[in-house]
Amino acid sequence: MVSTPFHATSQSDPQEVLRHVFGYESFRGQQDAIIRHVLRGGDALVLMPTGGGKSLCYQIPAMMRPGVGVVISPLIALMQDQVTGLLQLDVRAAFLNSTQSWQEARSIEQQMVKGELDLVYVAPERLLNDRFLDLLERVPLALFAIDEAHCVSQWGHDFRPEYIQLSILHERFPQIPRIALTATADDPTRREVLDKLGLLQAQTFITGFDRPNITYRIGLKQNPKSQLLDFLEREHPDDAGIVYCLTRNNVEKTAAWLVEKGWNALPYHAGLPNEMRQQHQELFLKEEGVIIVATIAFGMGIDKPNVRFVAHLGIPKSVEAYYQETGRAGRDGLPADAWMIYGLQDLITLRQIISGSEADEHFKAIGQRKLNAMLGLCETTTCRRQVLLSYFGETLEQPCGNCDTCLYPVKTWDGSIAAQKALSCVYRTGQQFGAGYLTDVLLGNATDRVMKFRHDQVSTFGIGTELKKDQWLSVFRQLVAMGVLEVDVDGYGGLLLNSESRPVLQGAQKIEFRHDAILTKKKTKREKLVQKFRWKDASDQALWDELRSCRLELAREQGVPPYVIFQDTTLEALVLNKPSTLQAMLQLPGIGDVKLERYGQAFLEVLEEHIGRQWE
């Protein structure tokens, strides 16, 4: 056991800090290069996938450089989570936000002036306050870290107006290094970040967007509740996860239904009382196996590493949003699922939201293009990961083998005649009806509505009986995805012909449709556990449960999330290696000097008791 605590200084080596404080033997990717660049006083733009270790890129330099590292973060939850984890490592960290009293904030400000803190997290609104800027003039500063830097982009999915004003840091503190970090930025957004933040001289570090531990799966929405239930029961019966819905109403209905079915599910959206949102978020972070059902109001800045799945019950509005939201799964590097079902109505709803917004036409056009790119990802017949990475300007040479289109190659069929029938039906019925109504006409269903409009008299009535209802709905959805049909966003979501319709109608363009996938995976709970963790036998599973219980008990005693004690990757290493001494424990990932001192003996006793039972 280490008798003298390790303290990082400007004379330390970053590798020493990583090992003794954070408990890891080596840096990943470009972490080492980024840290050394900032230590030398250089500015940096860092693009690194969620879970790739962005925070170490500013935390270690802030601990080693003289002065205080000021981290600009957009959400209270992110600040509190980061600081809680750092305090567990005996790093001198604090946050300043609206949850604190005047006296608490004043005390932290005094510590800043005296240089008694390594890291202070603040919201952009507070940082831009004249009083706080004046305070920073009296504070010894190590660096500025601008987290979630994509928030500066007006065309992005998470725009924050205050971020544009952060260029003031360069103007008032030109000698202090700045590091801007994000997991989500295409090339235009990167250029905007550099320009708006005054980082034109910064070195850009791009470590790639790939999250190989995430399995991407996208399928057709048929019966959302039963499809979700099947997914949870088969693959994630005890896991924490997030379920995203498009509307607040669906959030509440889905959460209530899951509770009825025996799941520990909580709703989260901007319309709920603030206290309830905070309570639900805290339960998600501090308890095991909680499912949050949410709108996109939830998740940004959530550092919970053992989220084993993110499920979407509808299509996100952009590839950036999808990447950001699915990136909340598997931050610990262990296998996780990004599971989504969607339908034509989701697309119609989002097109209408974009069209009905108060934004100018240029912004609306960008929004529609981003939605089209997301739809392209959904409808692709090739490797989803290749399509996803290509959107961010990255090339994956070979199919990933870990998405649904790789695991279960998509079959296609010649839909040229079906497409002609569908387009003719749109034309014959006056270009004002949706896919459900048009399907009734094609199938010859003489519903009251069809009879009311006398569409039993049109030439396309009953000409589509070779396909079933679900198949026709798929045809219309895919024609919209191909741009051969448009949605009337100014009306009631009816389908319209366009210039791309003519060559298909005339038979000059061949159409290939994909067979829709049904997202089921016939794997037992045991098989899934074998994939997630490398257990040798049932004894390993039992030890895992015992270590997890020990972790939860320690976390509850301190009122902190279990993962700030040890992450799942550390517990997995304990199960696989079964160390018999504290010194041997120190060799495992995530166990540094302080955590060994605090928790080593408790976990060693669990290991000894478990191994002792094996010999009985």
Image (tube, rainbow, N blue to C red):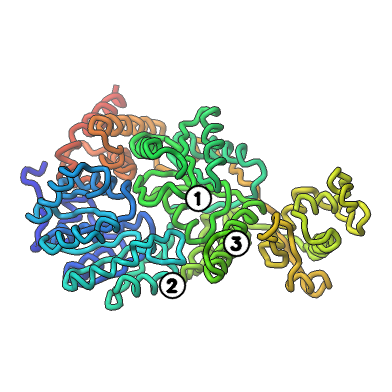
Badge 2 marks a residue whose secondary structure is helix
> Does residue 54 appear in the picture of this structure?
yes
**Disc 1 designates what residue?**
338
Badge 3 marks a residue whose secondary structure is helix
| Image: 88 above or below 393 | above
| Label 2 packing within 10 angstroms: few (<14), some (14-19), many (20+) | few
Mark 2 or mark 3, earlier in chain = 2
**Disc 2 designates what residue?**
187
What amino acid does circle 3 point to? Ser
Q: What is the CA distance from the residue labelled 2 to the residue labelled 3? A: 25 Å
Mark 1 or mark 3, earlier in chain = 1
Mark 1 or mark 2, earlier in chain = 2
Looking at the rendered image, the quarter that the N terminus falls into is top left
Q: Is residue 76 left or right of residue 338?
A: left
**Disc 3 designates what residue?**
355
> Does residue 536 appear in the picture of this structure?
no
